[in-house]
Amino acid sequence: MEFHVFLPNYLDDDEYEKEPQDYQEHPALPVWSPVLEHKGSEPALRLAKRWLRQCLKEHPECADTRCVRLPDRLLYIRTRDFKSRSFEVQLVETDGAKGCYVALSHCWGKVQPLKTRNEEDLKKWKKGIPWAELPRTFQDSIQITAFLGYRYIWIDSICIVQGDQDDWERQSAQMGRYYESSVVTIVAASASGHEQGILVRKNLFAGTVMLGNDFSDIPVRFQEPLVHKMPWFANPIDPIDMRAWAYQERLLSPRSLVYSTQEMKWECDTSHCCECGMDDTRFRDGRHDYHFRGIAQCTKAEALDVWYERVVPVYSRRDLTQGTDKLPALSGVVAKLSERIGGRYLGGIWEDDFIYGLSWRVSHENWVRRPIKLCPKYQAPSFSWASISCEGRYPAKRVE
């Protein structure tokens, strides 16, 4: 197994609390920038806050979402003592007020320990949600929100009444706006369920090497290679990368703070950076799955290219618990692209480019292999790529 090495000045129990610059290089070893071992440490939280502040102050191209119409419901966070991670949380109705808030994008997992099932839950959560009842991922996201300096967070499973079809349809239709208007979206990319959490400590291998004329022992830590440092690696590495609902949540968010399996990452309209200090060129030149920047200024032809070359193949290979969500889970992206494409949107096909829209095929080129499945319930017209549960792909070149 291959490892990358870095040298800390110390190896005591508090090592993970130190800043990245506290790691030193040695002339005899190739040293990679270390990632912080504990995502809940103050240095990790300060790094996230620094990325956000830099974007808000220095990125005029990024949307200013600090005074927007709030979602209909939000979780209000009252910090009693941050050092001891003591918070009070309650669900509130915003009544059309304006302000700023953080959103959470996450995998629900097979079991949801806490969600708003009915009006009874809604009334109960408005009085307060016991901290112990919140699953680990929600607790961590609330802590991050508080440290960033915000009091409100939107979490879909709590802010939408899941057992009320009218409320679900009304709120799910607004989800695109909710993520697009958030000041930042916390992406719990590494957690496949609510109980795993994202502010976790990643154990690094420790040891010593003998260097120099006297062959003295030098303490070192080893970390596995980061996949985006490998230009040939294009496969998703996080559980959230295979969830359909999470695609538009991250695509529409003006800023994303991503807690990935290997490191923290930052994505906004201006920059893409991560703990290791490497700039992902795929994001900059538009080849990244979540690149949706500048869509408001693109031409109709460019918007259609984005749809055919990236949105359809990336989205269609993702998983849905309910196949009937195939079209609703992409409605926010469709609304954004319709501003540039125009015309009617017919269940996955654009009317103004209907003939080419019918030329999709089932793809077997991607690393994700799955059987072709028809949904037992209606999810899209049979002429649409959205009617089946597998990756759809279009011919390489669209002729005008």
Image: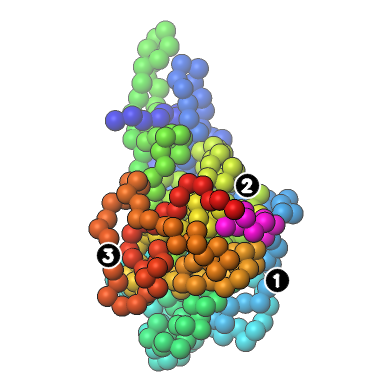
Task: Give the residue pinned by disc 2.
Answer: 271
Amino acid type, callout 3: Lys
On residue 373, the disc is 3
Query: Does residue 43 belong to the magenta stretch?
Result: no
For marks 2 and 3, give the one nearer the viewer: 3
Q: Residue 96: give x, y in percent of width and height.
A: 65, 84
SS class, disc 1: loop
- How many C-alpha atoms fall within 10 Å of the one at disc 1: few (<14), some, or many (≥20)? some
- What's the amino acid at mark 2? Ser
Label 1, on which residue? 67
Q: Residue at x 33, y 65 (%)?
A: 388
Q: Of tags 1 and 2, which is closer to the observer?
A: 2
Region rendered in magenta: 295-304
Q: Residue furthest left?
A: 371
Q: Is residue 302 left or right of residue 37?
A: right
Q: Nearer the viewer, residue 55 or 77?
A: 55
Instruction: State the residue in front, 9 or 268.
Output: 268
Asked if residue 301 lies in the magenta stretch, the reply is yes
Give the mark nearer the N terminus: 1 vs 2: 1
Q: Secondary structure at mark 2?
A: loop
Q: Please tell me whether mark 3 sits on a helix, a strand or a loop.
A: loop
Q: Position of residue 230 (x, y in %)?
A: 43, 34
